[in-house]
Image (tube, helix red, strand yellow):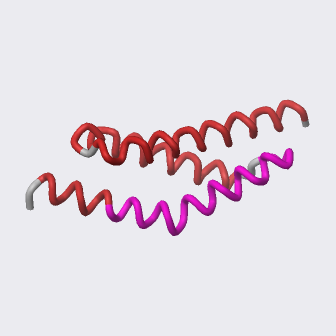
C-alpha cells in the first residue's frame, strides 16, 4: 500500500473518531470550563489523547495542507479549554 493511501486511511479514521467522539467531548469541556467548572481526571485523559494524536499526525500535515486549517482550529479549541481550566483552578 502506498504511503499516500495509508495517510488517507489514517486521516479518515482520525476524522471519524474526532467527529463522533472527541469534538463532542471538547465542546462539553469548553462549556463546563466556561461556567467556571474544573476539569476532572477523565477530561484530562481525553485532552492528553488529543495532544498525543496531534503529535502523531503532525508529520502528515505537510503532505495534506487541506487539513491544516482544521488542525489549527482544534489546537485553538484545546488551548482555550486548557487556559480557562487553569484559570478556574487558580480561582478555586
- Looking at the image, residue 66 lies above or below residue 13: above
Residue 32 lies within the magenta run: yes
**Quadrant of the rendered image containing residue 79:** top right
Q: Is residue 50 left or right of residue 29?
A: left
Part of the protein shown in magenta: 12-38
- Residue at 78% of width from left, 47% of height from top? 33
- Residue at 35% of width from left, 47% of height from top? 67
- Residue at 70% of width from left, 58% of height from top? 28
Instruction: Please name whichever residue, 69 or 3, is drawn nearer the observer in this view of the structure.
Output: 69
Residue 89 in picture, x, y percent from top left: 82, 36
Q: Is residue 69 left or right of residue 21?
A: left
Q: Quadrant of the N terminus?
A: bottom left
Instruction: Please name whichever residue, 3 or 44, is drawn nearer the observer in this view of the structure.
Output: 3
Residue 16 lies within the magenta run: yes
- Residue at 42% of width from left, 48% of height from top? 53
Residue 14 in picture, x, y percent from top left: 38, 59
- Looking at the image, residue 2 lies above or below residue 17: above
Residue 13 in picture, x, y percent from top left: 35, 64
Amino acid at each position: 500500500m502506498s504511503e499516500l493511501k495509508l495517510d488517507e486511511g489514517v486521516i479518515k479514521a482520525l476524522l471519524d473518531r474526532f467527529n463522533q467522539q472527541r469534538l463532542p467531548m471538547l465542546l462539553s469541556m469548553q462549556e463546563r470550563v466556561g461556567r467556571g467548572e474544573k476539569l476532572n481526571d477523565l477530561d484530562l485523559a481525553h485532552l492528553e489523547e488529543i495532544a498525543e494524536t496531534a503529535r502523531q499526525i503532525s508529520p502528515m500535515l505537510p503532505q495534506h495542507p487541506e487539513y491544516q486549517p482544521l488542525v489549527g482550529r482544534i489546537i485553538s479549541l484545546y488551548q482555550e479549554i486548557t487556559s480557562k481550566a487553569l484559570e478556574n483552578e487558580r480561582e478555586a
